[in-house]
Image (cartoon, rainbow, N blue to C red):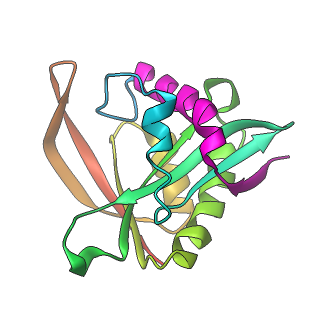
Amino acid sequence: MFTTRLATPTDAPAIALIYNQGIEDRTSTFETQPRTEQHIQAWFDGVHPTVVAERSGGVIAFASTSGYRPRDCYAGIAEFSVYVAQDARGLGAGRSAMTALIPAAQDAGFWKLLSRVFPENTASRKLLASLGFREVGTYERHGQLDGVWKDVVIVEKLL
């Protein structure tokens, strides 16, 4: 149904399109400004893997890692995100992307993945729980989105 692979800089336009849909939806990120292809290309630093899920040769989902904190003691921890194109949600593409990201992160030397999820994003929370992520707790009033304070649920998985 879906194929997954490590993303390359040539995937930046598709990743930006999917990420921008998530920004517009206001259900998955505090970001409010659309991302360009150039923003996404900066993710390809040779350290933090990004994977894509494809259907019929087109990218329909991605899962990415990024740095957690600059201190050396946190070098093996990566933050992650997963986004699915609006017209492909609920079909398992996010699961495929995350299932591929976990070993890619481990192969890159990470020992833990973590993220923050809006409490009302139940689809993401269910997906992550089914993949072995645990909910650590809730940061209350963690940030504002469109002038409204939002909580986030912290999730982590030891690799």
Residue at position x 31%, y 30% from top?
31
Pick the residue in front: 147 or 122.
147
The magenta-colored residue range is 1-25
Question: Does the magenta stretch mainly form a helix, a strand or a loop?
Answer: helix
Residue 127's x, y, as percent?
A: 55, 52
Is residue 68 highlighted in magenta? Answer: no
Residue at position x 37%, y 24% from top?
26
Pick the residue in front: 144 or 14.
14
Give residue 149's quadrant in the image.
Answer: top left
Pick the residue in front: 35 or 136.
35
Is residue 18 highlighted in magenta? Answer: yes
Residue 133's x, y, as percent?
A: 45, 65
Give residue 119's quadrant in the image.
Answer: top left
Q: Is residue 10 left or right of residue 79?
A: right
Count all numbered tags in the image, as a single digit. Answer: 0
Pick the residue in front: 127 or 46.
46
Residue at position x 69%, y 44% from top?
93
Is 104 drawn above or below residue 111 in the view shown? above
Residue 85's x, y, as percent?
A: 62, 30
Residue at position x 53%, y 61% from top?
49
Residue 121's x, y, as percent?
A: 42, 38
